[in-house]
Image (tube, rainbow, N blue to C red):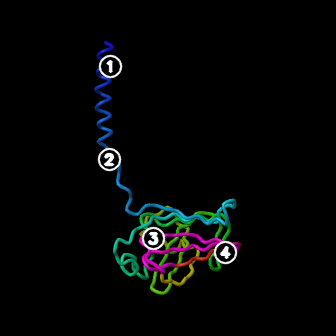
Amino acid sequence: MKKIILVVFIVFSTFTFQSLQAQSFPEMDASPMDLAMARPDKKSLPLARVIYSRPQKKGRDIFGGVVPYGVVWRTGANEATELDIYTPLKFGNTILKPGTYTLYTIPDQENWTIIINSDTNVWGAFSYKKEKDVARITVPCEQAAAPIESLSMIFKTDSKGTILMIGWDDHYVEIPFKKV
């Protein structure tokens, strides 16, 4: 009986191992998620963070092409970009309370409209609701010194607050958030 159990175990283990080997790991997302954190220094609590998906240029015309001018954009790929505020920050004339928001933009050739929206956990800009806007500002669109292959976001933080830089292709914008 022990021999039969041992044989069944070995056969079952062999088939299970072969089955596991046949499994393939899913391909990586074409626009992987990333995050940027605004922190005055390594010992300080964070001011804000942004979570977004990073689409690639892949030789395409980005602004005015893949990302049309004058249309609300999720500012990334996949889910709409998430902005977490950890301490009250001034955005334009609005004080943003700590919490989670969605960051949308409306790119144009000269300027971008930056939108902070209270509707969270949304896919893309398809479900964008203007009535959920918390604040909007307009910032100039600048020419990048070199092409940027992947959509990139980073914070520049100083004693007055932080600036969220968003760059892709040959353009970038700077979005100011001031400490209150």
Query: Which quadrant of the rendered structure holds the N terminus?
Result: top left
Task: Determine the image quadrant of residue 92.
Answer: bottom right
Rendering coords of residue 122 (x, y %):
47, 63
Residue placed under numbered mark 4 in the picture: 178
- Give the SS element for disc 1: helix
Pointer 3 or 2: first along the chain: 2
Rendering coords of residue 107 (x, y %):
46, 80
Rendering coords of residue 162 (x, y %):
63, 72
As measured in the structure, the alpha-carbon distance from the residue carrying label 3 to the one carrying label 4 is 24 Å
Pointer 2 with pointer 4, Cβ within 8 A: no
Residue 113 in the figure: left or right of residue 9: right
* Mark carried by residue 77: none
* Mark carried by residue 24: 2
Pointer 1 or 3: first along the chain: 1
Is 145 a magenta residue? yes
Taken as a whole, is the magenta stretch helix, strand or loop?
strand
Pointer 1 with pointer 3, Cβ within 8 A: no
As measured in the structure, the alpha-carbon distance from the residue carrying label 1 to the one carrying label 3 is 56 Å
Q: Which residues are magenta?
A: 144-172
- Name the kind of residue labelled 1 in the image: Leu
Residue 18 in the figure: left or right of residue 109: left
- Give the SS element for disc 2: loop
Pointer 3 with pointer 4, Cβ within 8 A: no
Residue placed under numbered mark 3 in the picture: 151
Q: At x 43% / y 82%, what residue is drawn? A: 70
